[in-house]
Image (cartoon, rainbow, N blue to C red):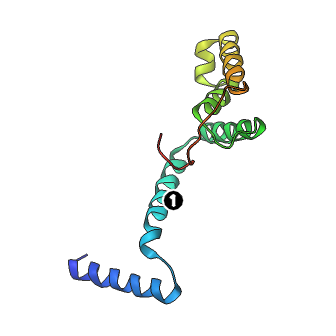
Amino acid sequence: MSDDAAITWKSDEGSIGREFGIDVDGSVPAIRRHLLLSQVLAAMTQRMLRTLLRSHQLSNQLGHGHVGTEHVLLAILSDPDSFPRNILGEEKANEVCAAVREVITSDSYTGYRGRPNEAR
């Protein structure tokens, strides 16, 4: 695409946005996030998708407003066929799960207090 075409396209984009009252420039980060997320999700195995869904379910059950690595860890170690659980063995995996649950269900657990889309 030539620079002239890019300028024309941007100009058309802006006029369409103004016509419909859409902040096109403000939408670009959201569109990029959507595209990136689509690519990441497409590359995940079914087991990984189930693990992420399970971590979200665990977070909700615990009343947490976020899904953190602690929830993902619990979901991974709760899967009897997961590679990490098999490396640790059932007894050690259960010990780790119990320790994580103890921490994240305690009164001192603060979790993540930022916005979900902010980098930590």
- Residue 10 image offset from top left, x and y in percent: 34, 80
Badge count: 1
Question: Mark 1 falls on what kind of element?
Answer: helix
Viewer-proximal residue among 64 and 77:
64
- In the current view of this chain or complex, which residue is farthest to the top? 91
Locate residue 31 relative to residue 73 in the image: left or right. left
Viewer-proximal residue among 63 and 34:
63
Tell me the residue that label 1 is attached to.
Answer: 34
- Classify 104 as above or below 64: above
Tell me the crowding category of disc 1: few under 14, some 14 to 19, or many 20 or more residues within 10 angstroms, Cα based.
Answer: few
- Residue 39 image offset from top left, x and y in percent: 48, 53
Locate residue 27 relative to residue 66 in the image: left or right. left
Q: Quadrant of the N terminus?
A: bottom left
Viewer-proximal residue among 6 and 99:
99
- Residue 30 image offset from top left, x and y in percent: 49, 62
- Residue 115 image offset from top left, x and y in percent: 56, 48
- In the current view of this chain or complex, which residue is farthest to the right? 61
Q: Give the residue type at disc 1.
A: His
Q: Quadrant of residue 74?
A: top right
Give me the residue at 48% from left, 39% from top. Answer: 120
- Classify 76 as above or below 3: above
Any part of residue 80 in sight: no
